[in-house]
Amino acid sequence: MSTATLPAAEAATIDQALTELAAGVEAWKACGLSRRRELIQRLHAATAANAEAWVGAAAVYKRLPDGSQLRGEEWTSGPYAVLTAAAVLAQSIAALEAGRSPVDGYGFGTAPGGRTTVKILPHGVYDRLLLSGFTAEVWMPPGVTEADVRAQAGLALRDPAGPGGVGVVLGAGNITSIPVLDVLYELYANNRVVLLKLNPVTDVLFDAFSKVLAPFIDLGLVRIVRGGADAGGYLVHHDLVDHVHMTGSALTHDAIVWGTGEEAAARKAAGTPLLTKPITSELGGVSPTIVVPGRWSDADLKFQAEHVVTQKLHNGGYNCIASQIVVVGSDWPQKEAFLNHLRTALAKAPARPAYYPGSDARVAQACQAYPDAEQIRSRVLISVPGDADDTAPEPALTTEYFGPVLGVMELPGDARQFLATAVRAANDRFAGTLGVNIIADPRTISGLGAAFDQAVADLRYGTVTINAWTGVGYLTAAATWGAFPGHTLDNVQSGIGVVHNAVLLANPERTVLRGPFRPSPRALFHGEASMSPKPPWFVTNKTAATTGRRLTGFAAKPRWSALPGVFISALRG
């Protein structure tokens, strides 16, 4: 058993849960594809039935009152995300049952560097309507062929009776779909039964999660426990645990893997981790938003300023891919106009409590590092030097503030020079590789041509978005989610491995997602093929709660009759 100390009653609860899961390993192996598809469909139904309670519980711990439009975030990043993932996963299993590959029916393409891409969005008429103007591709590493992708897609589902074991998921405390999606990935992609330990912040979700995961709990395939860091330490070292997956910070990861203090430094130097079990992770980082200079209308400047503020303030700023630094051109004639709109958008964004532990201390840390910080209501805007010595770590580029702190970095040059410099900075100076955003008007993208495509390819990030936010990549069920490949235990950055990935691609490199530069109807007036209005995830959207609820209802039961209500609410936003 684990050598970590824990009160006897709490240890006994965990021991019992893991003993039951160890017995469930063979039961899961005995579940063939049809049974596994039935179970994911039952989870889909349970999620739909408990969505209201789920959102209500999330609103309690995030302190969102009745009537707050910010509850829309909880609908879309909670039950909606699980419903869409379960639906795509069921389709992937059905393909394997029929002797096909899960990627059959998806388009393929190519990207710079000899990469094969899988076109995952739009996929079907509903995607084309609900996400008009959005596209997404999963890029495979150089040299992987289309035939390779088809042959390997499915992961552990290609051999349900194959190797598995007991996995522990250390649940996230910010986005409420993360723990459930991570459990599903352990079950379906890795063939492991799962003990989910809730983050103490989310204890209020225990009942909702228990009902959503009931199809697997009833068969002894999933268990949920509460507990703090001591329970996590007991779990990860337990003899009955084969694998650990966590969501959190790189500091937490290193404390688990190497320990703390001088002993941890000695272990890392010697390459002898405290945790000897395999661990995968999603750890966040310092996410940049690169604003490429162009000629924009005032409406464009205002919309994209709101876009950046949404990337920062969605969920209060407590997102692993919350934009922390907006990179703008120092020579851009419209720079000051854009920054003024940015300040206005920060001031107008809805107020919300700082619910996540340690938020005030992290904001104070940023203000101490940048004494000239602007206080805009409860938000902080800092200026980050763009010409600092690369050998001297810049605090805002190496510290994930995980709160309402937004930095502005200026870099010189015209669009081409600026983009090349910004890509180098994002790759070499920013901590983490989870997600990066690029904002550029279509004329500028067209003028840059192959140079723009190469810039996208050069970015070493797990999700790259153009005129969209990486949070949309998180919500795209068939997309991959995780750090750029190649991190190691002693330099973990944004983590190791991927999750989500509902078409079960083997060893993907990244997801690249594109959105419309302008909302409809302005997009149509400028010749852009998009009917999408202001997105419901914008923090300034006035009908976000209603739209989020209706989108979740549609995901629970896709049907044409539900679309008008979704569209009307979205347009009113």
Image (cartoon, grey):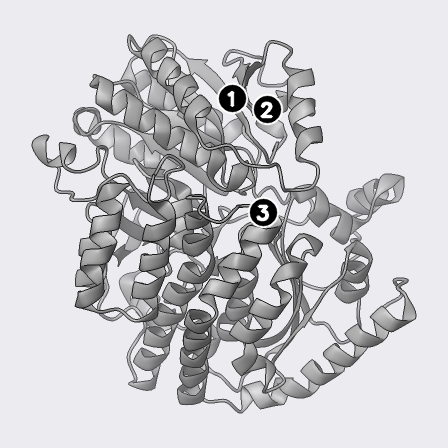
Q: Position of residue 490 (x, y in %)?
A: 69, 45
Query: How many badges with numbers are in the image?
Result: 3
Indicate the position of residue 522 as horizontal and vertical percent values.
14, 32
Q: Residues within 10 Å of mark 1 (few under 14, many from 20)?
A: many
Q: Earlier in the sequence, mark 1 or mark 3?
A: 3
Is disc 2 in contact with disc 1, using a CB cutoff of under 8 Å?
Answer: yes
**In-front residue for pair 469/57:** 57
Amino acid found under the numbered disc labelled 3 = Lys
Q: Name the amino acid type tagged 2.
A: Ala
Task: Sort mark 2 into few (<14), some (14-19) or many (20+) by Cα contacts within 10 Å.
Answer: many
Say if residue 122 shows up in the picture: no
In the picture of the structure, the residue carrying the numbered disc 2 is 396
Query: Which residue in the protein does label 1 denote?
Result: 407
Q: CA distance from mark 2 to mark 1?
A: 7 Å
Q: Nearer the viewer, mark 1 or mark 3?
A: 3
Q: Could you say which is closer to the camera, residue 427 or residue 248? A: 248
Q: Nearer the viewer, residue 520 or 281?
A: 520
Question: What's the distance in space between the residues labelled 2 and 3, CA to CA?
Answer: 26 Å
Determine the secondary structure under disc 1: strand
Mark number for residue 62?
Answer: 3
- The reply to whether the C-beta atoms of the residues labelled 1 and 3 are less than 8 Å apart is no
